[in-house]
Amino acid sequence: MRNPTHLTRSRHGVFYLRWRLWSATEEAGKPTFLKVSLCTRDPKEALKLAQMMCAKAVSLGYGPGCRMRYDELRTVLRTHFLEMLAQHKERMGQSGPLDALRLQALQNSAAFGEAAVATGEPVFQADDADAEVLLRFIRKYDLRVTSGTEAYDNLRRLFPIAYRDYARAVLQHNESYTSFDFQQAAVAEPRRRFEVAYVTSLSKLVDMYFDEAERGGQWAGKTKFEKTDHLDLLREIIGPEIDVRDISVPMAQEVKSVLLKYPRNRNKNPVTKGLALQDAISLAGTEKINAQTINKYLQTYGTMFEWARKNGYVSENVFAGLTIRSTKRAAIVRKPFSSDQIERIYSSIVANEGGNIRLPYQKWGPLIALYTGARLNEIAQIHLKDIAIEDGVWYFDLNDDDGKRLKTDASRRRVPIHPKLVEIGLLDYVDGLRKRGDTKLFPSFTYCTKNGWGRALGRWFNDTFLPELGFKNESLVFHSLRHTVTNSLQRADVPQPIVQALIGHTRENMLGRHYSASGFELRQLHEALLRLPY
């Protein structure tokens, strides 16, 4: 479910309706907000309640599109096209007058705008193009305008006028570059920066930043979860409705000072859970987040404000250079399992020594990892249609179809099914699932925003199975199975490009980067896996 912008969620998971109120006494462009708790953590119930309350607000004349003044629309359009004009002037100042193609395009734009003003015909020729442009414009500036209202009709009439005059202004400025005027001394035009209207609050900036990152597919589930946590805290520290242009370096330093006192697992620890921020950071005897975690928060803030600077919402990145310089502690190195440990793991699973294996995923998850080197989530999200045969070789098709996620482009690959897996009954298990009408290799798995599809498998293997075998330490986890396969193939003198194709690693040289896993036949990959010593 995609929540509307006026439906927000607190750090405790409670939904709130955040509704913008406008009145004639307000300073232009400075909205007031009403925030009401919906008293529910259920997203569907929250959406239903919000829709009912929004409909009531609109019927009373307090909704979007009800109060947008004519002069306000002109101000927004002027600001928008002034910014575009400034961008053209900047490019001409650097590179000279428009080339023939761009000049013709601007002349056409001016003509289309003129015709639209004179006849009422659309500015753009494609079907519904004008409506789509207006919709993007309304969304960009969060205007109180909806289709079918007087404000929308005014905007529809004003837009072609502003568009025409903008095109004329660009052409006029371009003309000034085609000759010299010696009647008066040339005065360099000061460089100006036009700020985008109606994008002022921190909450609005965060929403826009998240929306762009999601559209670009920049974050996996776990990363998005982390960023949400970081930015929720930022809003809590300095306030969600503060104008981002008023956020200064001293305020950023204050954020850093809060982080230095911020308790670890604040919302999980019974001692700090539910406490207000000031009470939580003032509480004595609580463990604080470490320097590495503090830097993660600051890097999130710095990245967002750098994005805001480049997009013209702020003049500087006030969080630049605030990360803590510290002696980096040695990262935990995931080790491969030894031969004796692999033998113990295999026998404990296949023979079920000790009765550790109670569910199918507890058997097949680790064994698939042991004989393919695939990542935890790659295994957990396999669909039955991803298990196929070609030229007599059964294989797993590891892909990102049907909403599945992969770590990198190189992760998209086909990995042969080792004969050992066939021997102990993997294909029989798959046939049973298909006859039952299932579509996934592990039908009971559910998706976790933070940990993907593999949460149940990883927690069982790391927290239950390995400790029962006496192998549990920070260096040995489910991912160690992947290291075990990689090391075993390398020790068996399997060529590095084939190892990388099987494991899903990006190649290290330019030739390798263009020589994908599909460059090897399944037979070659199958023969390489047969060199595993177990």
Image: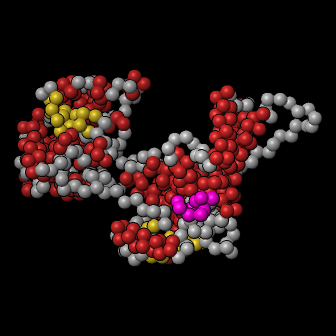
- On the image, which quarter does residue 123 sit in? top right
Q: Which quadrant does the C terminus fall into?
A: top left
Asked whether 113 or 34 is in front, the reply is 113
- Residue 256 image point, x, y percent: 56, 61
136 magenta-colored: no
The quarter holding residue 65 reads bottom right
Give the position of the N terminus as an image quadrant: bottom left
The location of residue 58, given as percent across then percent down, is: 51, 72
Q: Residue 520: where, in percent of width, then height?
A: 26, 24
Residue beneath the point at 9% across and 44% down = 431
**Residue interval drawn in magenta:** 145-154
Q: Is 326 on the left or on the right of 195, as rendered?
A: left
Q: Residue at x 52, y 41 (%)?
A: 126
In the displayed structure, 469 sits above or below 91; it is below
Question: In the rendered image, which quarter is residue 229 located in?
Answer: bottom left
Residue 329 visible in the current orientation = no
Vertical side of 273 occupied by 448: above or below: above
State how many labels appear. 0
